[in-house]
Image (cartoon, rainbow, N blue to C red):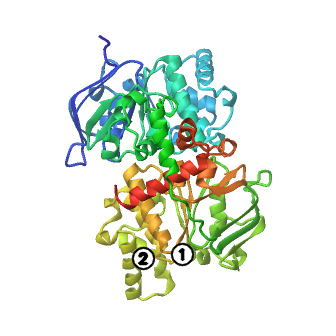
Amino acid sequence: MTTPIISFRDFSFQYRAQKRPTLHGINLNILPGERVLIAGPSGSGKSTLGSCINGLIPFSFPGEVKGELTVDGVDAPRSGIFELSAHVGTVLQDPDGQFIGLTVGEDIAFALENACTPQNEMKKTVERVAGLVDIADHLESAPHELSGGQKQRVSLAGVMVDQVKVLLFDEPLANLDPAAGRQAIELIDEIQRKTDTTVIIIEHRLEDVLWRSVDRIVLMSEGRIAADMRPDALLSTDLLKTHGIREPLYLTALRYAGVEITPALRPAGIGTLTLGEAEKAKVRAWFQAAPDRTEEALPQPLLEIKNLSFGYTPEQRTLRGVSLTIGRGEMVAIVGRNGAGKSTLSKLICGFETPESGTMIFDGEDMAGMSIRERASRIGYVMQNPNQMISKTMIYDEVALGIRRRGYTEEQIRERVEQTLRICGLYPFRNWPISALSFGQKKRVTIASVLVMGPQMIILDEPTAGQDFRHYTEIMEFLRELNAQGVTVVMITHDMHLMLEYTPRALVFSGGELIADKSAAQVLCDGDLVRRAALKETSLFALAKSCGVDAPVAFVDRFIDADREVRAHGR
């Protein structure tokens, strides 16, 4: 019998600052060479589990440990974090937080320098691991000059120089565009095959991870292991839905079509899915039974942009000749690869940067003469990380901050703040400190602080980044309600599910240019457009083709309508 490389036995952990344990009675064995996905909603304990494996617990995050944990023969809780680092390499969700060297080569060599490795040997090792992760051509580059996917490769090379036996990835897809995320999963799979390293991936984006196969999925819930199963077996149950994890979209579509999901269908990946003629016929019948869609009238223009160009340096244009119109009351997604110019566009709209050429008209008025303050009263901007926007201790004070400078009486301020807090579902917490809120609630506070100004448009940068499915749904349904009240909502996002399910229209950027203005379904069913903009073709498109549906865009629209109907009725 093979000896586990990682073994938890009746293991519990309680942070020093917590009243209750975060992990309860964990019994888990992981064998050498296995690929294991640890999934679970926010607060389920999955990241804490990973921190126990790599030694951050109890050394960086002290607390009380009960039970046993062995990692590659080492008594993990009672050894040193330096000792564990020779056995477990960790790649964080934010690669920038791991960079130390001024060049890629220096960064990869950091651990070797600490170990006083002879220079010739060090150079050979760096070249070997750089070749293994396909980053050898960038050894002289500065890490900040690399793409998101390339940064992941450098981080991986940096932990592989020690020839660790376990690679731990903590939400590796969180900050990557869809194409780079897919490449990251392919890279992890390739490295595992080449080295037979044990791979552990902590991630709640299940469908993206399952682009390549894993041996097991460990589902965490409230600090306990809710399931430890083969992917095909787990995806045939309702455990994911029960514990707030989004199942792959193609499986949801099959369920809507009345197809029973069983392990025999091999549902763990769209590439392995095996449907018989009976199942395919059910899918076609469900598609053909779709009611006709009614065409909606074009909205009146709110924001008109014509031939907009901008560059941070004279040599490099970040945006070139961008022209677009966003109508009143629309809900629009802006998508594209990292560095495509999406966030730069929002900065120009908000007045944080000044365009070199072109015009922007908002509600019939030329924006060239508007100050940042004037724009902020009409266009709200919500950053990806709420902690970067919050400056007050209490919720009420944070939401009131923007309108205190407008000359309102204290009674008028209170009336507007409390009305906004009710809209945002935060009124019961109005006297709470912000520190007591969850990440998702903090996100609502930042939206409330913008909404209280009475803007006609809100721009949100990655509104659901790092959110599990339950919090993702809460935020998006809240934004949908705001939109129904007449607020125009524009979202910059890498989340293709968000774009597909919530925004009827998508603006696609690549290389500083607007290359498409289409429906979300049309974008994600266009292979050429997907490649140019570093997006990811929806698995619904592949399902439609495999079932003999010759109108994949209409099939995706059918799914969107059915999914909205299900959400509307709370099923």
Alpha carbon separation for disc pair 1 and 2: 15 Å
Mark 2: secondary structure: helix
Q: In this view of the protein, can residue 495 be seen by the observer?
A: no
Q: Where in the figure is residue 453, as x and y percent of width and height? A: 50, 77
Mark 1: secondary structure: loop
Q: Where in the figure is residue 277, as x and y percent of width and height? A: 48, 32
Which image quarter holds the N terminus? top left
Which corner quadrant of the image does residue 364 belong to?
A: bottom right
Query: What numbered label is drawn on residue 455?
Result: 1
Which corner quadrant of the image does residue 166 belong to?
A: top left
The residue at the point 62 percent across, 71 percent down is: 297
The residue at the point 36 percent across, 74 percent down is: 422
Check disc 1 and give the amino acid type: Pro
Q: Where in the figure is residue 500, as x and y percent of width and height? A: 54, 53
Please tell me how crowded label 2 is: few (under 14), some (14-19), or many (20+) other residues with Cα within 10 Å.
many
Left or right, 531 with respect to 455, comes to: right
**Above or below: residue 398 compared with residue 275:** below
Which corner quadrant of the image does residue 306 belong to?
A: bottom right
Disc with the residue nearer the chain's start (1 vs 2): 2
Q: Nearer the viewer, residue 12 or 243?
A: 243
